[in-house]
Amino acid sequence: AEGPKPCSSATNHGLPSTLPLAEGSRLYAAAVAILPGAGGMPRLHAAMALEGEGDLVAIFAQEAGSWLPMGELRVPHGHAAAKTSLAFMGGGDLLVSTEGGHVQRRRLS
């Protein structure tokens, strides 16, 4: 399996060129956004749901060139096999929704 493919455009803007994925991992949903971090400084955040990881969404923040784990969020009612959508909204919230109509909103900052 090939590793992550770097994004040269992201690097040119001072952003990381890859997400924090183990080799061979497959995303089924992801979202990224620049949100306020500690002390109000903006940080890049990523939320990802991986195939084979059950009903969890992993949340990371970029700091000093590294991805730091921020926590996990359960997909509502264990519908990880169903279509799942992730979106950052409201300047610091993560919205998780499934094709079954379940919605969860978590404040991150």
Image: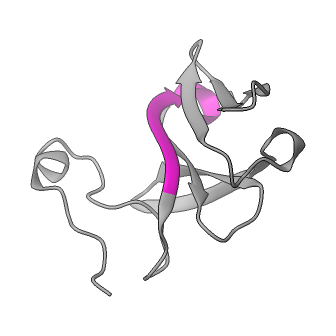
Q: Which residue reaches farthest top?
A: 90
Name the spot of residue 12 as percent of width and height, x first: 10, 47
Write the residue at 68% across / 30% down: 97
Q: Which residue reaches farthest bottom?
A: 1
Helix, strand or loop for the magenta stretch, by majority: strand
Name the spot of residue 11 as percent of width and height, x first: 17, 52
| Vertical placement of residue 25 versus 100, above or below | below
Question: Where is residue 100, by image quadrant?
Answer: top right
| Vertical placement of residue 32 versus 39, above or below | below
Is 103 one of the magenta-colored residues? Answer: no
Asked whether 62 or 26 is in front, the reply is 26
Q: Quadrant of the N terminus?
A: bottom left
Is 30 one of the magenta-colored residues? Answer: yes
Write the residue at 66% across / 71% down: 52
Range of residues picked out in magenta: 28-41
Asked whether 14 or 106 is in front, the reply is 106
| Vertical placement of residue 5 versus 49, above or below | below
Question: Where is residue 64, by image quadrant?
Answer: bottom left
Left or right of 24? Residue 73 is right
Q: Which residue reaches farthest right?
A: 77
Left or right of 74? Residue 108 is left
Colour basis:
one colour
Question: Where is residue 3, by image quadrant?
Answer: bottom left
Write the residue at 45% across / 32% down: 33
Write the residue at 68% across / 27% down: 109
